[in-house]
Image (cartoon, rainbow, N blue to C red):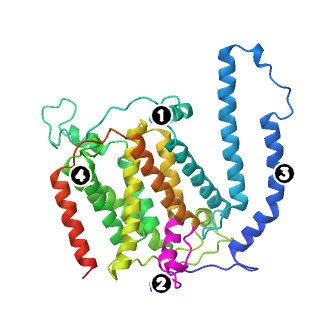
Amino acid sequence: MAMVKCVKSVPKGGTEKESLEKTVKSGSLVALFVCAMLLIVLSGAFKPAVDMSSLTPTERDAMRTGNLKSSLIAVCASYLLYSALQGPNTHMVRPHPAVWKVMHGLFVLYLLFLVFLLCQETGDARMVLKFLSSDLGVELPERAYGEDCRIYTPEDPESKFRVLRDTVFDEFFVGHILGWYGKAIALRNLPLLWAYSVTFELMELTFQHWLKNFNECWWDSWVLDVAMCNFFGISLGMMTVRFFEGRFYDWMGTKDSKGLSGKVRQGLQLFTPATWDSYIWNPTSSPLRFTQCAFVVLVCLVFELNAFFLKFVLWIPPPHLLNHIRLALWFGISNVSTSEYYVFITSKEGMHLTKMGANAWLVVAAMIIEILVVLKHGRGMFEAPWPKRVLWFWGAFATIIGVWLTR
């Protein structure tokens, strides 16, 4: 049975989590009434009714659009308030348990929004996004990164290394490193991270006949992405995990911090977990554990691929705010859901007698709905036949894995 290394600080008078939860419970009714008063004011519940007949058609449409957006914001805010006060508990208590409850609520709203998009026709789904952001609803030009794979371009007047320069200074280069830094903090296991890293590059080769974005130069995929960006992101993330792992911190601030550096460190510690668990996945210890670990990598791969396919079928430009919001939501819930899934597969009672955590369940549900959204709104877009080399490769890969699992 895999073990979790975990060290907790226990302040006087009970654990930090218990003391914070008591604070939330004691102020929940006050927060409810204060927010109810704010809702009365912001909704104009006691204002005189507007005479719509006195308005021009343009003014009526603008008022209805504004009211609809305000109503959606109020609905979301009300649900997030409920999540903060009554949402499911997690092992995360810093900077406050309510933060992670709100994150759970945000992801629930994202799941419901996906279900809403799934129930629309493709044109209407794109118009819904255009309603949220007026610059959407326009078909995107396809961009291929592998059209010119030369590193040295002597004839180019701007730079003799223009292709390399454009790739390195691409808008996603730094984001690539930060993304793998976050993934390392979530998974906390080098074999799984490198399996994830290499397999995603294989996924790009697998689907490049459908998405031109995946058509990259070999040195872009395997040198810049894997050997540089992924390596630096994973290394920094694992250094962060090793730095905090097993350390004892005075989370409640019962010890006085001396000096500016001490105060800064104490302030930063408020945004880290109260404990850092070391995940011992051991994917090759048994066929069952291999399957359990492979499922984690599969979920991560689907999350990555869905980002590209959703942008393509719903016409969302890569730099758009909606893409950043989705990434932030997935990153915010990944740490909690990974911990819950690890507890689920290593439970002494067994998986069949253990309930999967709410956040882990939510991640799997969102992954499935994202796939359904791509399948529905991508009808007719992915009709190019599979290349034979792709079918042969994955056929051989599945055969090897199957033989190993049944050995």
Residues tagged 1 and 2 counted as in contact (Cβ below 8 A): no
Whether residue 318 is visible, yes or no, is: no
Toward the viewer: 280 or 388?
A: 388
Say which label, 1 or 4, has the lower sequence index.
1
C-alpha separation, residue under disc 1 versus residue under disc 4:
28 Å
Determine the residue positioned at 29% across, 61% down. Answer: 199
> With respect to residue 247, does 97 lie above or below?
above
Q: Is residue 96 left or right of residue 358?
A: right
Magenta span includes 345: yes
Residue position marked by numbered label 1 in the rendering: 126
> Nearer the viewer's eye, disc 1 or disc 4?
1
Say which label, 1 or 2, has the lower sequence index.
2
Toward the viewer: 345 or 227?
A: 345
Q: Residues within 10 Å of mark 4 (few under 14, many from 20)?
A: some
Residue position marked by numbered label 3 in the rendering: 33
> With respect to residue 343, does 232 lie above or below?
above
The kind of residue on which mark 3 rests is: Phe
C-alpha separation, residue under disc 1 versus residue under disc 2:
47 Å
Residue position marked by numbered label 2 in the rendering: 3
> With respect to residue 282, does 174 lie above or below?
above
Magenta span includes 197: no
Quarter of the figure with the N terminus: bottom left
Element at label 2: loop
Q: Residues within 10 Å of mark 3 (few under 14, many from 20)?
A: few
The kind of residue on which mark 4 rests is: Leu
Whether residue 403 is visible, yes or no, is: yes
Could you say which disc has been placed on residue 205 in the image? Answer: 4
Q: Which residues are magenta?
A: 336-357
